[in-house]
Amino acid sequence: DAGITQSPRHKVTETGTPVTLRCHQTENHRYMYWYRQDPGHGLRLIHYSYGVKDTDKGEVSDGYSVSRSKTEDFLLTLESATSSQTSVYFCAIRTGVGHNYGYTFGSGTRLTVV
Amino acid sequence: KQEVTQIPAALSVPEGENLVLNCSFTDSAIYNLQWFRQDPGKGLTSLLLIQSSQREQTSGRLNASLDKSSGRSTLYIAASQPGDSATYLCAVVSGGGADGLTFGKGTHLIIQP
């Protein structure tokens, strides 16, 4: 089973503070993703990475930045947290080869901005 | 832009019934379709993955079908059990495939004992 861990699991932060969420994988998968999940909206893609230092924006990237300096770590940063960024954040990795690939998700980080 | 719709949004049935969850997508040029299960407050568990060249996949009491040309997939659950209660999410991979999954909003399923 693909090893993917997210940290922290829960965080409460104040408006205007920077926050960094970490996603760590143990199997050298090339593609990694950050999603947020909100009631009424489902899961939406924030940013993704297709290799070390290679990242791109998703559907809801405003207010977020990412970095991938190592294959195993994909960091999501909220430069100045706002209440609208209160959400559950999921990291995912793409597993498999060729066209036979799927996605495995981490357990999520519940972020509350007060 | 790909859009994924799941019907119904919620479903409550007695234990033992066979049931069908529906998923439709607007752009038929998909690579794969994946069904997930999510329990309250938890992450996503992959149930079934269907490649675009496949018509269906089966795992235990679950069967997922894919009709790419009509933009539809169904998840069939046989002999439902209370432990099947969860939210079921349908997601597709479109375009170049690098930019991940597009999700539906899910079907919230309750199986009454």
Image (cartoon, coloured by chain):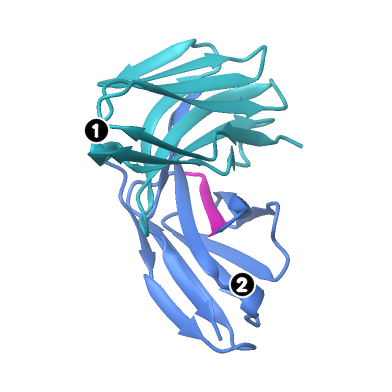
Say left or right for B29 vs A114.
right
Q: Toward which corner of the image does residue A36 lie, by quadrant?
A: bottom right
> Percent x, y for residue B62?
33, 22
Q: Chain B hue?
A: cyan
> Percent x, y for residue A17?
59, 88
- Please, what secondary structure does the residue beneath circle 1 have? loop
* Circle 1 residue: B81
Labels 1, 2: one chain: no
* Amino acid type indicated by mark 2: Gln
Query: What residue occupies the far right of the structure in this picture?
Result: B1
Q: Which chain carries label 1?
A: B
Q: Toward which corner of the image does residue A87 lie, by quadrant?
A: bottom right
Say left or right for A78 vs B26.
left
Crowd class of label 2 (few under 14; some 14 to 19; many from 20; radius 10 Å): some
Q: Toward which corner of the image does residue A37 lie, by quadrant?
A: bottom right
Q: Do the residues labelled 1 and 2 touch (CB within 8 Å)?
A: no
* Amino acid type indicated by mark 1: Gln
Magenta highlight on residue A33: yes
Residue at 69 percent across and 30 percent down: it is B95
- Please, what secondary structure does the residue beneath circle 2 have? helix
Residue at 70 percent across and 71 percent down: it is A63
The magenta region covers: A30-37
Tell me if residue A8 can be seen: no
Q: Which chain carries label 2?
A: A
Q: Chain A hue?
A: blue
- Mark 1 and mark 2: span between their CA atoms? 36 Å
Residue situated in front as seen by the camera: B104 or A67: B104
Question: Which of the image's four quarters has the C terminus of chain B?
Answer: top left
Q: Is the residue B97 above or below the residue A77 in the image?
A: above
Residue A85 marker: 2
Say left or right for B1 vs A21.
right
